[in-house]
Amino acid sequence: MSTPIKPELGETPQGGVRLEPGLRERWGRQRMGRVRVPITIRNSDDLAAVRRNLISEEQVRSLTVEGFVDTGANFLCLPKSMVQRLGLVYRETLLVRTANGPVNRNLFVGAEVGIQGRSLPSAVMEIDEDMPPLIGVLVLEMLDFVVDPGGERLIPNPEHGGDWMADIY
């Protein structure tokens, strides 16, 4: 069963969606696409072991991959094989909403996520193997990045002059 279109928007005779007056102008005509960025994920327990001189930096389990920025996702999401390669620690299984309905997904801890020179610890949600790594809004908020959809890029929050700033209020 399809979701009905809001009556105030309606449909065009060709089957397309009729936008409310002025919406196309407010959105602009600029093409918007997917935002992909390099992301480095490292095992935070390994990093702690380096700080205690128990292992060398070369022994830290780490991956650098291209991630898709997904503002519809909360967490950093990685395929199971990447979670296993990083040696992350299972925390719990959560019920999550997806485009295909609710599913159970495993949540892991013990990762440090790095983008454009900024890094912090992050939980990681396991996703299906055929999905690309997804960078969710919690990561964006932690690292103080915003999406520039027209430029198809991730940028430091311009409200903070490009500086990395955290909120504590």
Image: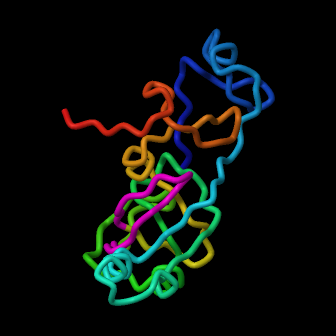
The C terminus, quarter of image: top left
Residue at point 46%, 80% (across, down): 83
Q: Quadrant of residue 160?
A: top left
Front in this rendered view, residue 36 or 56: 56
**37 lies left or right of 54:** right
Residue at point 65%, 42% (across, down): 153
**Residue at the left extreme of this rendering:** 169
**Residue at the front extreme of this rendering:** 53
Query: What secondary structure is the magenta-colored segment mainly?
Result: strand
Front in this rendered view, residue 33 or 117: 117
Front in this rendered view, residue 12 or 39: 39
Front in this rendered view, residue 97 or 45: 45
Position of residue 26 relative to residue 112, above or below, is: above
Give the percent coordinates (x, y) of residue 90: 30, 81
Marks counted in the figure total: 0
Give the percent coordinates (x, y) of residue 52: 28, 81
Find the magenta span and give its range.
107-123
Q: Using the rendered image of the protein, determine whether residue 106 is visible from the camera's viewpoint.
A: no
Q: Using the rendered image of the protein, determine whether residue 25 is visible from the camera's viewpoint.
A: yes
**Residue at the right extreme of this rendering:** 14
Give the percent coordinates (x, y) of residue 59: 48, 88
Residue at point 31%, 66% (across, down): 95
Position of residue 124 relative to residue 139, above or below, is: below
Q: How did the renderer colour the structure?
A: rainbow
Residue at point 70%, 20% (across, down): 28
In the image, is residue 29 part of the stretch drawn in magenta? no
